[in-house]
Image (cartoon, helix red, strand yellow):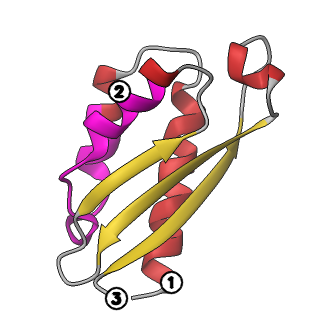
Amino acid sequence: MKTIFVAGHSKLPTGIAANHISESLTLTLEIDKKYGVILDASCTLATEHGRGFIKSLLKGYSLKDGIEEPIAILKEGYLGKAGNALEAALKDSYKQYQLNQ
């Protein structure tokens, strides 16, 4: 197997569409084992457009370089109410990644 799958979780703020589905947000990442590059990403935002946008923001970053750059691009690109939850889920995903290195 050349990839690994990690999942990070966080609590969603109240009053947003995704909160009607679940109280938590899940961010999943498929990562190349050798280089740590995010090959695919998915999250439990309510809209397909939002999920696709988050995927496009995170794809291509190497977690071997840390998460500062992906967090910065997430903060710059995603201006919705779930921004803090996405950041927390990314940090949790990164923690899961580090535990398995």
Q: Looking at this view, is 85 or 5 the one in front?
A: 5
Q: Which residues are magenta?
A: 50-73
Q: Looking at this view, is 89 or 72 the one in front?
A: 89
| First in sequence: mark 1 vs mark 2 | 2
Label disc, if present, on residue 53 of the rendered structure: 2
**Residue 20 % position (x, y):** 82, 20
**Residue 70 % position (x, y):** 28, 45
Q: Left or right: where does residue 30 sit relative to residue 70?
A: right
**Above or below, 30 relative to 28:** below
* Image quarter in which the C terminus is found: bottom left
Determine the residue positioned at 33% across, 53% down: 40
Q: Nearer the viewer, mark 3 or mark 1?
A: 3
Helix, strand or loop at disc 2? helix
| First in sequence: mark 2 vs mark 3 | 3
Distance CA(mark 1)–CA(mark 2): 27 Å
**Dot 1 amino acid type:** Leu
Residue 9 in sight in this render? yes
Q: Looking at this view, is 52 or 64 the one in front?
A: 52
**Dot 3 amino acid type:** Met
**Above or below, 40 relative to 4:** above
Q: Nearer the viewer, mark 1 or mark 2?
A: 2
| Label 3 sits on residue | 1
Determine the residue positioned at 27% across, 35% down: 56
